[in-house]
Image (tube, helix red, strand yellow):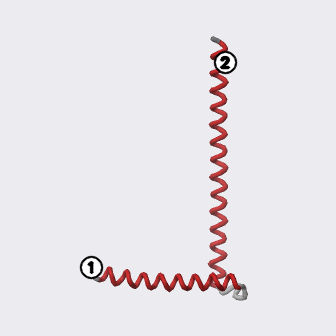
Amino acid sequence: MAGIIDKVGILTQMAVDKGREVVDVNKLKMEIKSEERTIKSYLLIIGQYVALHDVLRDNDIIVEQLQKIKESDQRIDELKAKLDIIQSQR
């Protein structure tokens, strides 16, 4: 009987240890995701600065991406105009 109780105790401790490990792993993954979001936020700020201040205009990649942004802005304006027409007809 004592052997069974010892085995149950060992299994219980193993389960507790595994649970702690899972919690630790998940906590680390959450911290990694948080840092990745922080980096993306900084990159967004840098990108906005570059776009708004015409920085790096001699870089073909930047110029191409700025052109894509301009095209998307124009498309947004077109879509908003269509939306305004539809909403005004109600």
At a point 67% along the width and 55% down the height, the residue shown is 32
What residue sits right under mark 2 in the picture? Answer: 6
Q: Position of residue 51 (x, y in %)?
A: 63, 82
| Name of the residue lying farthest toward the top | 1
Q: Is 61 in front, or is 48?
A: 61
At a point 69% along the width and 88% down the height, the residue shown is 57
Q: Earlier in the sequence, mark 1 or mark 2?
A: 2
In the displayed structure, would residue 9 be above or below residue 23?
above
In the displayed structure, would residue 62 be above or below residue 31?
below
What residue sits right under mark 1 in the picture? Answer: 90
Mark 1 and mark 2: Cα distance apart in space: 75 Å
Number of disc labels: 2
The amino acid marked with disc number 1 is: Arg
Do labels 1 and 2 touch, CB within 8 Å? no
Mark 1: give few (<14), some (14-19) or many (20+) Cα within 10 Å.
few
**Please, what secondary structure does the residue beneath circle 1 have?**
loop
**Please, what secondary structure does the residue beneath circle 2 have?**
helix
In the displayed structure, would residue 58 be above or below residue 87?
below
At a point 44% along the width and 85% down the height, the residue shown is 78
Mark 2: give few (<14), some (14-19) or many (20+) Cα within 10 Å.
few
Q: Is 89 in front, or is 52?
A: 89
Q: Quadrant of residue 33?
A: bottom right
At a point 65% along the width and 38% down the height, the residue shown is 20
Instruction: For the C terminus, give its image quadrant.
Output: bottom left
Q: Position of residue 16 (x, y in %)?
A: 63, 32
Q: Quadrant of residue 38?
A: bottom right
Q: Which mark is residue 34?
A: none
Q: Position of residue 73 (x, y in %)?
A: 52, 83
| Name of the residue lying farthest toward the left | 90
The amino acid marked with disc number 2 is: Asp
Instruction: For the N terminus, give its image quadrant.
Output: top right
